[in-house]
Image (cartoon, rainbow, N blue to C red):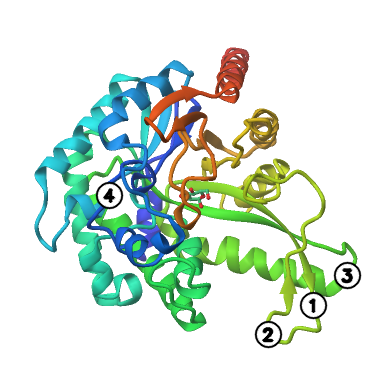
């Protein structure tokens, strides 16, 4: 029997007694002083010219206890964090054990606050020494990351259950190797394809290796999936194009790793109306936005898309699903409230219709460093005052808290009815 089929059969069932409600963060975006990472270098050399640098970020590295206590206070029972490889292994082969101790405390603090951790191993950033060797562009480098991840999981395994190996591999490949917006600023389709293949390989290897370290782990990736719809409903070319994007953006990567995931982590942000444009030979498509609500980043706000994506994933892969990210940049906090309300309605509709959704983690717990956009976009349920790094709970966070209570009660009574 092929190995992946045998593994498939031995997979632990993702059985969660409690629906996970919470929020997410990633290390580089909040911890601060990620000085050994490729992103830090990129900020110093490139982004700082536009006044963008992550600097101390929200100083979450020191203030994580306060942040987690707030998450508990606003009703969360789960939280997604990432572990910063560049801090754990700032120089090749040299592990900083004070950092390992730090992350042990982070996980223990989550536990003490009754927040079930969902832990990401790679959220867009890596050590400078690894990036210098070409990062994931070279197959020979995959082993280096796999060895590091095995070591890390060995150290932390008593507090791990849900592991996300790689955050949004397609977004990373797209931004870093196709549009060149992110480090290492490459713009080559060939490299984009190559990096995607290597990231899939990395995940597949990691899945098997990490299961040896800790068989009870539930492992997946966080996949950014989008809604692609034909701009002109009855236009054949628009329809073909929408299908093409659905496959290449949403499914191709998942198809490559579908035998080595226990569940699917879904990050949902984007709606795209796809229009075929004959005039442009090279860029034969465009993404026109229909007029509907927009976030501060000018991204279209389309909560129903979460339902569309969950149902598509459910039908195609028949695996449990957790929303690992979903949110809006909304400084005034005017949109977030209805966004949360509508998004959760759609998530629970999908659940009612048979999708095995077991959690919703909002992006983000606090405001944070939004990559090449700096600190301006405000995604947090908790507001950060960057003058003094004080935290204050936004009104929408309290609305989310009420929604959590409502859905928890609903789930409990459904449970009772079943008994
Ligand atoms: C990423 C986050 C990012 C968020 C909002 C996701 O693509 O995982 O790091 O902050 O979207 O842009």
| Quarter placement of the N terminus | bottom left
Q: CA distance from mark 2 to mark 3?
A: 20 Å
- Mark 2 lies within 8 Å of ligand 1 (Cβ measured): no
In the rendered image, which residue does mark 1 sit on? Answer: 277
Q: Position of residue 352 (x, y in %)?
A: 68, 31
Q: Position of residue 63 (x, y in %)?
A: 30, 29
Near mark 3 (Cα within 10 A), the count class, few <14, some 14-19 or many ≥20, is few
Label at residue 84: 4
Q: Position of residue 208 (x, y in %)?
A: 29, 57
Label at residue 257: none
Q: CA distance from mark 4 to mark 1?
A: 42 Å
Label at residue 282: 2
Q: Is residue 404 left or right of residue 165?
A: right
SS assignment at label 1: loop
SS assignment at label 2: loop
**Which sits earlier in the primary sequence, circle 2 or circle 4?**
4
Q: Do tag 4 and tag 3 residues touch (Cβ < 8 Å)?
A: no
Q: CA distance from mark 1 to mark 3?
A: 12 Å
| Quarter placement of the C terminus | top right
């Amino acid at each position: 029997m092929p190995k992946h089929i045998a593994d498939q059969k031995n997979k632990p069932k993702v059985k969660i007694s409690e629906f996970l409600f919470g929020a997410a963060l990633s290390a580089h975006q909040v911890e601060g002083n990620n000085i050994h990472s490729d992103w830090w270098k990129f900020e110093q050399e490139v982004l700082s010219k536009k006044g963008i640098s992550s600097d101390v970020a929200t100083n979450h590295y020191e203030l994580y206890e306060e942040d987690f206590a707030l998450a508990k206070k606003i009703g969360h029972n789960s939280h997604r964090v990432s572990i910063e490889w560049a801090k754990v292994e700032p120089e090749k082969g040299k592990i900083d054990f004070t950092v390992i101790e730090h992350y042990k405390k982070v996980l223990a603090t989550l536990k003490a606050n009754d927040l079930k951790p969902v832990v990401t191993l790679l959220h867009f950033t890596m050590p400078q020494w690894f990036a210098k060797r070409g990062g994931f562009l070279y197959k020979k480098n995959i082993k280096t990351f796999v060895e590091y991840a095995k070591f890390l999981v060995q150290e932390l395994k008593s507090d791990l259950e849900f592991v996300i190996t790689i955050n949004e591999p397609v977004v990373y490949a797209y931004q870093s190797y196709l549009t060149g917006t992110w480090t290492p600023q490459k713009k080559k389709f060939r490299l984009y394809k190559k990096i995607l293949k290597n990231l899939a390989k990395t995940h597949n290897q990691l899945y098997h290796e990490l299961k040896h370290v800790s068989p009870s782990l539930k492992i997946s990736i966080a996949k950014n999936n989008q809604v692609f719809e034909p701009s002109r409903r009855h236009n054949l070319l628009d329809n073909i194009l929408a299908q093409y994007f659905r496959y290449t953006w949403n499914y191709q990567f998942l198809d490559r790793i579908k035998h080595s995931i226990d569940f699917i982590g879904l990050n949902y942000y984007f709606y795209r109306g796809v229009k075929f444009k004959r005039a442009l030979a090279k860029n034969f498509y465009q993404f026109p936005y229909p007029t509907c609500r927009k976030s501060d980043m000018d991204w279209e706000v389309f909560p129903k898309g979460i339902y569309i994506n969950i149902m598509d994933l459910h039908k195609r892969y028949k695996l449990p699903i957790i929303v690992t990210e979903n949110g809006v940049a909304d400084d005034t906090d005017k949109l977030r409230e209805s966004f949360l309300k509508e998004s959760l309605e759609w998530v629970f509709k999908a659940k009612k219709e048979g999708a095995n959704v077991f959690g919703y983690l909002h992006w983000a717990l606090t405001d944070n460093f939004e990559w090449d956009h700096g600190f301006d976009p405000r995604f947090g349920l908790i507001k950060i005052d960057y003058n003094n790094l004080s935290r204050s709970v936004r009104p929408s966070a309290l609305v989310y808290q009420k929604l959590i209570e409502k859905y928890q009660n609903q789930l409990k009574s459904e449970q009772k009815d079943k008994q």
